[in-house]
Amino acid sequence: MFDLPWTHIRKFSVATKDARGQRVDFGVWISTTVGEDVVVEPRPALGRGFEGGPDKLATIVRVLRALQRELGCRGAAADQP
């Protein structure tokens, strides 16, 4: 666990990886202003053996971007979908 202040977040994106020759979405990529990017992979809920699909990850990224803009954090203007 670590602190990641909103002011250090430059942008949010959907993280992708290669799986069996295809690009698949697997998490949220957080680009920081301090040069140490972070990828967060959602954990499955209890009783569910699978993660959220690409549509849910895209929704999470849109919500995070909206929160960042609403909070007036400096990286929000640089974040493009």
Image: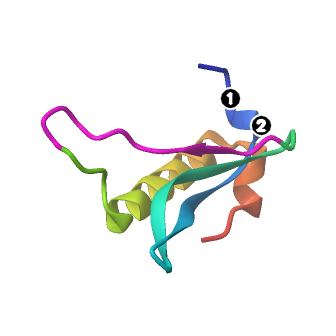
Which dot marks residue 24? none
User: Which residue is under mark 2?
Assistant: 8
Residue 34 % position (x, y): 87, 39
Q: Is residue 17 inside the magenta stretch?
A: no
Q: In the visual, does 23 lie left or right of 77?
A: left
Residue drawn at x 46%, y 70% is: 24
Cα–Cα gap, marks 1 and 2: 7 Å
Which corner quadrant of the image does residue 35 belong to? top right
Above or below, 22 relative to 63: below
Residue 80 % position (x, y): 67, 69
Q: 44 and 31: which one is in front? A: 44
The span picked out in magenta is 36-48
Q: Amino acid at mark 2?
A: His
Residue 69 % position (x, y): 62, 51
Q: Amino acid at mark 1?
A: Leu
Q: Are marks 1 and 2 in contact (CB under 8 Å)?
A: yes
Structural crowding at the residue carrying mark 1, measured as other residues with C-alpha within 10 Å and reported as few (<14), some (14–19) or many (≥20): few
User: Which residue is under mark 1?
Assistant: 4
Q: In the visual, does 77 lie left or right of 69?
A: right
Q: Is residue 45 inside the magenta stretch?
A: yes
